[in-house]
Image (cartoon, grey):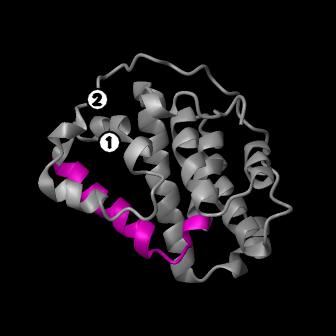
Amino acid sequence: MANPPIHPYEAIPRVAPISTDQLRPEWKATLARIPGAGLKGSGFPGYVLGELMRSPELFGPFLEWWVTAKSTMALSNREQELVILRMGRLYSSDYVWKHHLLTAREFGAKPEEIAALLEGRFDDFSPRERALLTLAEAMVCDRYVSSEIWEAHGGQLSPQEMVDLMSLVSQYVLFALVNNVFQVPLEAPLRDAPGLAQA
């Protein structure tokens, strides 16, 4: 499928995020379990989390699901980040792309692989990674997995891995939509990171 157009980045949010200074102690403890360094420190996605905090009764359970999935699902950190970067491109979400560019590099994504994800070229990835990317793209673009795609790639994943992939896609559909609908601004440390237009 052709890549969607990249829409201009919006600097002013439609809905101002709540400050993550107001994170409850249990939420901070959950966030501390995120694997790797890319989503911590300067890469912390405070603004999108601040938008989700507007629904506090849903935010806590979602946060627990998101962080637990990142550390325990049957997909490696690298595999997760490849899928997330591709979803950032499919949703034209500079926020998702810039945040996860750092994390993908941390878990071993090479410059040429990042360029391939930007363009939607999966041929040079391993058969398993190609399956994950192709299946995720079908879920996002078609909201369905055709018999042809299932026969070509479904056998690469166990039933648990398929459920984990659907969970990952579901999480980043939410993140991408929150970013795009609320026009969530980027945190200052990431504003000069390569975005979709120049990655």
Q: Classify residue 120 as left or right of residue 106.
A: right
What residue is rendered at 77% in x and 55% in y?
113
Q: Are the residues tagged 1 and 2 within 8 Å (C-beta)?
A: yes
Q: Residues within 10 Å of mark 1 (few under 14, many from 20)?
A: some
Left or right of 178, for residue 10: right
Specify few, some or many for label 2: CA neighbours under 10 Å numbering under 14, 14-19, or 20 or more: some
Q: Which residues are magenta?
A: 57-78
Task: Please tell me the numbered disc located at residue 49.
Answer: 1
For residue 26, which quarter of the picture?
A: bottom left
How far from the left and from the top, in percent, is residue 86? Answer: 65, 49
Q: Nearer the viewer, residue 123 or 190?
A: 190
Say which mark, if any, is on residue 17. Answer: 2
User: Residue at 38% across / 62% down in the picture?
Assistant: 34
Dominant SS type (magenta): helix
**On-image quarter of the C terminus:** top right
Q: Position of residue 175 (x, y in %)?
A: 44, 44
* Image point (78%, 48%), residue name: 120
